[in-house]
Image: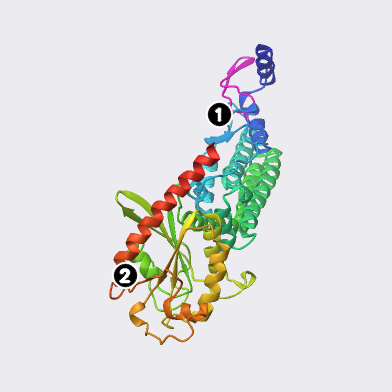
Amino acid sequence: MNGGRTFNLLQQWRIPPGQSLSGRRERLGYQMLKGHFFPVKVWNFRSFCCCQELQSNVGDVVEKSSAFGSDIALKIGTQGKPAQNHKSLGAFQKLPIVMPSIDILTSAKRKARNVPPTRGIANLAKRERNKGAKQLDALMKELAVPLRQYTENFPNKQYLHPYERSLIELTLGDGNYEEVLGRVDSLRKKIVSIGKQQASLCAQSMSKREAEERLNEGLKKIEEVFHIGSIAVEDLLHVAKTLRAMPVVDLEKPTLCLVGAPNVGKSSLVRILSTGKPEVCNYPFTTRGILMGHIVLNYERFQVTDTPGLLMRHDEDRNNLERLTLAVLSHLPTAVLYVHDLSGECGTSPDDQFTTYKEMRERFSNHLWLDVVSKCDLLQVSPASNLEDDLEKYKSFGPEGAIRVSVKSEFGLPELKERVHDMLISQMAKIRNETNSKES
């Protein structure tokens, strides 16, 4: 049965007598542009051909076609396949390299100019229109194929890890990722349409001069269409650079997440505890993204994230920086180091910090938690008034069990490092237990 199927395939690729292999290649180019990709190599032995590495449509073998003087990998078997659900992080580091639009155009024009006419055509008019049609087709292909590869190889957002999905929405804006990819695909379709049209017109030329004029006119039109839509390629280049620069989080390694109001000293503690070097300034929202560092304790490597500050307000009123912090807490298995500043210098009152803290503590109660009161060298000992009141206790001492530290005087830092180490060891055991439970 398989032999019969192979024979049928060979019959489909049989070249009738009197028909040149080059003509077959021209139609092959149009087939490829319509999405019919066949990874084969054809040799013309009189009236039959041999096909190498024929494969069913469930395969993933990639061959190269040189029908128009260029080697561009074409895949079969990828269309119709369901996208894979990414259970782990790291999709941003696998994004394809997007070339600047000017580089794509320059490369395409150079390759198209080098496409020769089919050998054996003695008539000057026929040879010129053959060359013109092939060069226009090659330019279309060299521009359209990279655009198609971009749209196919950038991941579908709905199949990403929830954390990476949140990063796309909060960093690029809701819907912008899909909109940019849509514009790139729209540009590809326009290039294919105008390219086929101009190649067809050139192939119908009646004289050598007419063929040359239609070739030049076609090249200009294709280039003009690409120039008009090239901003989509530049936007995609910006998207790729932005996402690829996002910090990579290993879900199998314990992560310490520093949380708190803006300007409470989170970044200073990250610099003390880890290899991370965030900007430290005396104004709110210095941290404008998720910053990563690492801690190495007893030959164990742990991750540390510095997050933007949280203000006392409802979730719908939060800015994208605050939502990044909530995305980390919601989607990553982190241990929380919550930083409080009761000195009154951070710009957020202790009353507001207390309200936000209670909300976060209740919402993320399943996380391991450690409270730290920073800048303790600036705190004044207040007389005990109503220690029965939770807010008054908080204003005087911070949450129950909180560690008091001062980066300036280094007070409390040894105890903090020891407690952080113990919590990360517990977090590692928690991650391993959850992994073993899922596997069983």
Quadrant location, the N terminus: top right
Q: Residue at x 58, y 58 (%)?
A: 166
Kindly state the secondary structure of the residue where label 1 is placed: loop
The residue stretch that appears in magenta = 38-56
Q: Quadrant of the C terminus?
A: top right
Question: How far across and down, in percent of the image, does residue 431 sit?
Answer: 47, 48
Q: Is residue 266 visible?
A: yes
Residue 253 visible in the picture? no
**SS of the residue under disc 2:** loop
**190 left or right of 101?**
right
* For discs 1 and 2, the disc positioned in front in the rendered view: 2
| Residue indicated by mark 2 | 412
Q: Amino acid at mark 1?
A: Val
Residue 65, by quadrant, is top right
Measure the alpha-carbon separation of dots 1 and 2: 60 Å
Q: Mark 2: which amino acid?
A: Gly
Q: Residues within 10 Å of mark 1 (few under 14, many from 20)?
A: some
Question: Residue 142 placed where, x, y %?
Answer: 57, 43
